[in-house]
Image: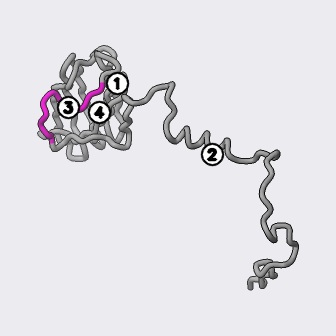
């Protein structure tokens, strides 16, 4: 028996943990106020996995749930205190070799606010405001209205 490998990420109201076990059977997830227990049989050899996690902060066990797929089991833990960031999943600071941060889903939601636009939004707005005013007089460029043929205006040979 060994722990299943897992990835986790934090959101404003939830913490998500994905246990990466293919072809899992007999999945059992037990949510307690400050602890999560996960067990299953996995793979073609029905290897037994068991993970016990003392959580960084309290959760609401009644509002927490899990979903099994062929490749993993995703657990959605409802935070006991919404809006409080979890710097780590576990109560202890110990490095667990089976647990990693899911950077593909990680979002730094603490700094987000609806009033402030992100730098990208500000840049996009600036770019949209820059172009296309027909009333603006553009400076004359020598040769811009010249209809003489350029070297790149020559006819291209046919493809064979």
Q: Main secondary structure of the magenta part?
A: loop
Distance of mark 1 from mark 4, alpha carbons? 10 Å
159, 70: nearer the viewer: 159
Dot label at residue 152: none
Position of residue 127 in the picture relative to residue 35 (left or right)? right
- Taking the image as shown, residue 103 lies to the left or right of residue 2, namely right
The disc at residue 127 is 2
Which of the two marks, 2 or 1, is nearer to us in this view?
2
Residue 17 badge: 4
Real-space CA distance between mark 2 and mark 1, rounded to the nearest whole angstrom? 36 Å
User: How many numbered badges does the structure rendering display?
Assistant: 4
Label 1 Cα crowd, 10 Å radius (few <14 / some 14-19 / many 20+): many
Q: Residues within 10 Å of mark 3 (few under 14, many from 20)?
A: many
Whole-angstrom CA distance, mark 3 to mark 1, is: 21 Å
Mark 2 Cα shell of 10 Å, populated few (<14), some (14-19), many (≥20):
few
In the figure, 56 relative to 122: above or below? Answer: above
- The residue at 74%/85% (across/down) is 160
- Please tell me whether mark 4 sits on a helix, a strand or a loop: strand
Give the number of the disc on residue 14: 1
73 and 120: which one is in front? 120
Q: How is the image coloured?
A: one colour
């Amino acid at each position: 028996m060994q722990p299943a490998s897992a990835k986790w990420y934090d959101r404003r109201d939830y913490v998500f943990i994905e246990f990466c076990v293919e072809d899992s059977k007999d999945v059992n997830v037990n949510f307690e106020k400050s602890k999560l227990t996960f067990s299953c049989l996995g793979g073609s050899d029905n290897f037994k996995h068991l993970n016990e996690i003392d959580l960084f902060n309290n959760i609401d066990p009644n509002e927490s749930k899990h979903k099994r797929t062929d490749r993993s089991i995703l657990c959605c833990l409802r935070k006991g205190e919404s809006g409080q960031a979890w710097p780590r999943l576990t109560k202890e600071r110990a490095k667990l070799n089976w647990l990693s941060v899911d950077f593909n889903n990680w979002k730094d939601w603490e700094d987000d606010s609806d009033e402030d636009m992100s730098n990208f939004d500000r840049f996009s707005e600036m770019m949209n405001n820059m172009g296309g005013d027909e009333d603006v007089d553009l400076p004359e460029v020598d040769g811009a209205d010249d209809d003489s043929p350029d070297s790149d205006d020559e006819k291209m040979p046919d493809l064979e």
